[in-house]
Amino acid sequence: MNKTQRFKYLSEYAIDRLCECFMNEFHKDLPEALHFVYHSRTYALICDQTTELYIQSTGYLYELLRREYLEARLPCTVHPQTAP
């Protein structure tokens, strides 16, 4: 297996597992999970071979995705400071 084939196999496996974990934890259906995963920053980083993120464990990758999802759901609590 060459490097390109390894990248394709590992990244596809990671995406499959991320969708599965996301559906289980957040009770989403497959289309919702696929939409979130494929539009996430985590996905973009996995697809960037230079980051070599695709070789990380599924647990590590899922934690990145999970945090991204939870942070996106948080209400904005930062308010611009007014000048005195």
Image (spheres, rainbow, N blue to C red):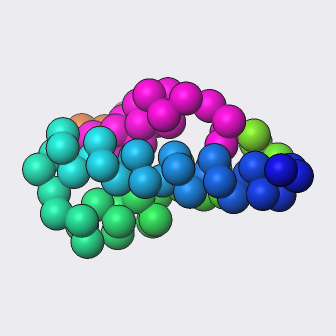
Identity of the residue furthest to the front in this view: 1
Residue 15 seen from this side: yes
Identity of the residue furthest to the left in this view: 27
Q: Is residue 17 above or below residue 5?
A: above
Badge count: 0
Quarter of the image for the C terminus: give it: top left
What is the x, y in percent for residue 31? Answer: 26, 71
Q: Is residue 57 above or below residue 77?
A: above
At a point 83% along the width and 58% down the height, the residue shown is 4
What is the x, y in percent for residue 83? Answer: 40, 39
Identity of the residue furthest to the right in this view: 2
The reply, left or right, for residue 33 in relation to residue 84 is left
The answer to if 75 sits in the magenta stretch is yes
The reply, left or right, for residue 46 in relation to residue 13 is right
* Quarter of the view holding residue 74: top left
Q: Which residues are magenta?
A: 53-76
What is the x, y in percent for residue 64? Answer: 46, 36
Secondary structure mostly seen in magenta is helix
In the depicted view, which residue is nearer to us: 6 or 80? Answer: 6
At a point 52% along the width and 46% down the height, the residue shown is 14
At a point 83% along the width and 50% down the height, the residue shown is 1
The answer to if 24 sits in the magenta stretch is no
The reply, left or right, for residue 14 in relation to residue 8 is left
The reply, left or right, for residue 5 in relation to residue 81 is right
Q: Is residue 57 above or below residue 41?
A: above
